[in-house]
Amino acid sequence: MNTRIRDLPPDERPRERLWQAGPSALSAAELLALLLGAGDGRGRNALALAQYLLSRSGGGGFAADGSGAADSEADGSEAVQAAPDAGWAGTMRPGMPAAGPALVALGSAAASDLAQVPGIGPAKAARVVAGIELGRRAAAARLTKPAVRSPRDIADLFGERLGRLDREHFYAVLLDTKNQIIAAEHVAVGSLDASLVHPREVFKAAVRQSAAGVVLIHNHPSGDPSPSEADVACTARLQQAGRVLGIAVLDHIVIGNPGYVSFREAGIGGLYPEVE
């Protein structure tokens, strides 16, 4: 049975370590343990449960297939050893697993997926997803309106995250008159059909924030960034709506894994001269 976190020495408890040394001193498992808040009630404390969740993330195992049920009674040491040994940019502590690929998988997991992991459940899953989303928004808020000079700028900003998702996600990147990014609005999840990607959803935020132009961007989970007929039709429809509103659709970028296709660079649909 795991030692309760409250029974650990103060310098080994995640909460106390955060107060003493700051969040950057904590491992991924320690940060995740603080989000979870408690163990599974069956012998695994919050830190061991966090290590177990990272091991499941790194192994790609979120399906409710019962494969983790037996593990839920273990003391967590197997979970530590099973975590992927790949580089993580944060601070590592002795005995803590490296968590790079696991964090990527965890960042793209839905709450419903996490809730199926033994010992997690809906409440803990919601806290984890909320914490990850807050981190994303904080990172986006730190952007000091980067200027877009080419499709590569957009692909570099959004490609790594979008390229790993298992469903299509559609964003409208709003630009001001200097081609600086105002915001990136998440418009839809799923295939780009007329009912899903509606002009009012794409341009609502653009009108509200007085954007001069938008760059459309979405991913292809297949990894092939070649635009489909639906992509081309969707873009043409949004171009037409943008002309009516006086908001230019400057480009549509399709993210693959790896690579991207820019409608403007490829000359698809007559999209637009280079931005000076």
Image (cartoon, rainbow, N blue to C red):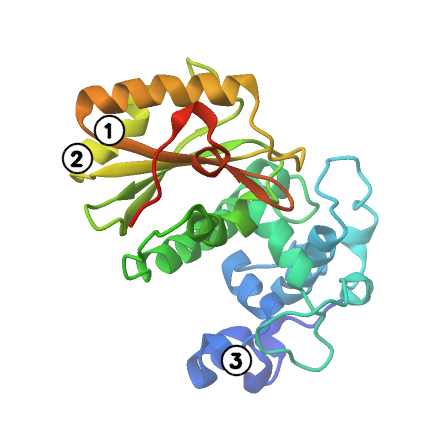
- The residue under the point 18% across, 27% down is 246
Secondary structure beneath dot 2 equals helix
Front: mark 2 or 3: 2
Q: Is residue 263 left or right of residue 187?
A: right
Pinpoint residue 123: horizontal percent, then vertical percent.
51, 45
Pinpoint residue 173: horizontal percent, then vertical percent.
34, 41
Q: Are marks 2 and 1 in contact (CB under 8 Å)?
A: yes
Q: Is residue 73 left or right of residue 259?
A: right
Pinpoint residue 257: horizontal percent, then vertical percent.
64, 44
CA gap, disc 2 and disc 3? 40 Å
The residue identified by callout 2 is 208
Which amino acid lies under the numbered mark 3 shown in the image of this protein?
A: Ala
The residue identified by callout 3 is 25
Residue 174 occupies quadrant: top left
Image vertical order of residue 62 relative to residue 234, above or below: below
Secondary structure beneath dot 1 equals helix
